Image (cartoon, rainbow, N blue to C red):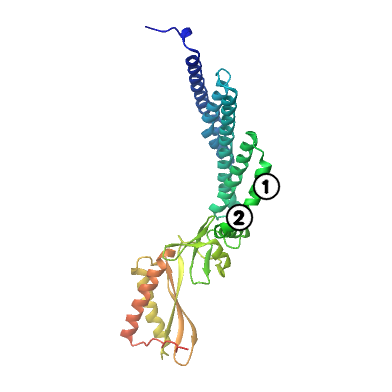
């Protein structure tokens, strides 16, 4: 037995209209994406910059949901709701709309900072801390707009946050000290992502990222150490300028000391023979590189010099050095070359 549509109960009729309205609104959002936004995307790809593509992509992701919220707003006009329920629903729709817009703006700002930030320091990527702070500021402003739109006075809230912030700061001294230290490190520009640094503790490597809590440093072995920002800001840091990137060829100097030799030319020839063999045979060596020997000083019981080698990548330095020292020691033993005595303990 069929029931005429005009004989439906009022609640069923309102529910059906709401479902249809939401479905049509969601469909309209997808049509806008397929026709209008797609056209803007084609235009954006013809321009030289990338900012317009970033904006269009973020808007495209949110249009169907904004259209759905528009359908929900229209549905309130014919739904039989109590004044309190209607006010609550209206507030929820408003909050959802502001939240979607805030997320879109945060996504745009974060990607724009990541894309255009390196222009101030070419070749240096933007730290995660900078992007996270940008996102946090926009989300905080969006939250304040939502609260104000819902009728919540934000002035007492800000006052309470100011008073409670002192207690929070005392309870979270370590995380906050790391946060602000990382912020100062990023703003000062004294050391940035990609710099090769040496710490007073003896650790050295490339800065690969700076986040709200710590700085990641890639060591010569390829391992990554995590240094709290507060510790890093209190350390004596040497920034090595003109140091090659971790993915490019790197020079490698090995210091050698031998007892005074009567024939330095013969000593140099033996040392270079071992160095060339290491360059050709050891994985990570550069076969076409010509090693060099540079004498540094001569004392009464020893001659000190450096051997300059080359490694294909930063992470190959340890293996190349290891093999060179081992093979040089064996060759010196066969040639009768005596190593310099260790300095006396003081």
Residue at position x 33%, y 85% in the image: 335
64 vs 270, nearest the viewer: 64
Q: Residue furthest right?
A: 155
Residue at position x 46%, y 61% in the image: 246
Secondary structure, mark 2, is: helix
Circles 1, 2 touching at the beta carbon (< 8 Å): no
Pointer 1: residues within 10 angstroms few (<14), some, or many (20+)? few
Q: Position of residue 252 (x, y in %)?
A: 45, 71
State the quadrant of the N terminus: top left
Please, is residue 308 above or below residue 29 in the view? Answer: below
Please, is residue 76 above or below residue 260 in the view? Answer: above
Q: Position of residue 262 (x, y in %)?
A: 41, 91
Residue 327: tell me if it is visible.
yes
Pointer 2: residues within 10 angstroms few (<14), some, or many (20+)? few
Q: CA distance from mark 1 to mark 2?
A: 13 Å
Residue 126: tell me if it is visible.
no
Q: Tell me the tag on residue 331.
A: none
Tell me which label, 1 or 2, sits earlier in the chain.
1
Q: Position of residue 257 (x, y in %)?
A: 43, 84
Q: Position of residue 261 (x, y in %)?
A: 41, 89
Residue indicated by mark 1: 159
Please, is residue 209 above or below residue 202 in the view? Answer: above
Residue indicated by mark 2: 167
Secondary structure, mark 1, is: helix
Relative placement, left or right, of 194 versus 166 is left
Number of numbered markers: 2
């Amino acid at each position: 037995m069929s029931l005429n549509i005009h004989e439906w109960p009022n609640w069923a009729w309102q529910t059906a209209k709401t479902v249809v309205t939401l479905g049509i609104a969601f469909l309209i959002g997808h049509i806008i994406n397929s026709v209008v936004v797609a056209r803007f995307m084609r235009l954006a790809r013809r321009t030289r910059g990338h900012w317009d593509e970033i904006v269009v992509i973020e808007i495209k992701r949110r249009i169907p949901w904004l259209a759905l919220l528009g359908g929900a707003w229209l549905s309130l006009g014919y739904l039989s709701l109590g004044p309190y329920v209607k006010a609550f629903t209206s507030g929820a729709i408003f909050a959802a709309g502001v939240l979607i817009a805030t997320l879109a703006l945060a996504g745009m700002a974060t990607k724009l900072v990541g894309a255009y930030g390196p222009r101030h320091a070419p070749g240096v990527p933007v730290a995660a801390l900078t992007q996270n702070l940008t996102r946090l500021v926009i989300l905080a402003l969006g939250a304040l707009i939502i609260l104000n739109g819902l009728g919540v006075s934000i002035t007492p809230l800000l006052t309470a946050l100011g008073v409670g912030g002192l207690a929070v700061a005392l309870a979270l001294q370590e995380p906050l000290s790391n946060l602000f230290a990382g912020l100062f490190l990023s703003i000062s520009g004294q050391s940035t992502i990609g710099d090769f640094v040496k710490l007073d503790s003896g650790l050295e490597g490339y800065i690969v990222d700076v986040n709200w809590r710590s700085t990641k440093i890639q060591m010569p072995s390829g391992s990554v150490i995590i240094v709290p920002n507060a510790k890093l800001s209190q350390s004596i840091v040497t920034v090595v300028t003109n140091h090659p990137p971790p993915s490019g060829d790197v020079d490698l100097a090995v210091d050698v000391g031998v007892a005074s030799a009567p024939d330095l030319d013969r000593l140099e020839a033996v040392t270079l023979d071992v160095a060339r063999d290491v360059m050709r045979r050891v994985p990570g060596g550069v076969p076409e590189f010509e090693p060099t020997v540079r004498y540094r000083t001569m004392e009464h019981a020893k001659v000190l010099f450096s051997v300059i080698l080359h490694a294909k990548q930063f992470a190959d330095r340890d293996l190349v050095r290891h093999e060179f020292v081992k093979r040089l020691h064996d060759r010196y033993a066969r040639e009768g070359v005596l190593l310099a005595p260790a300095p006396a303990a003081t």
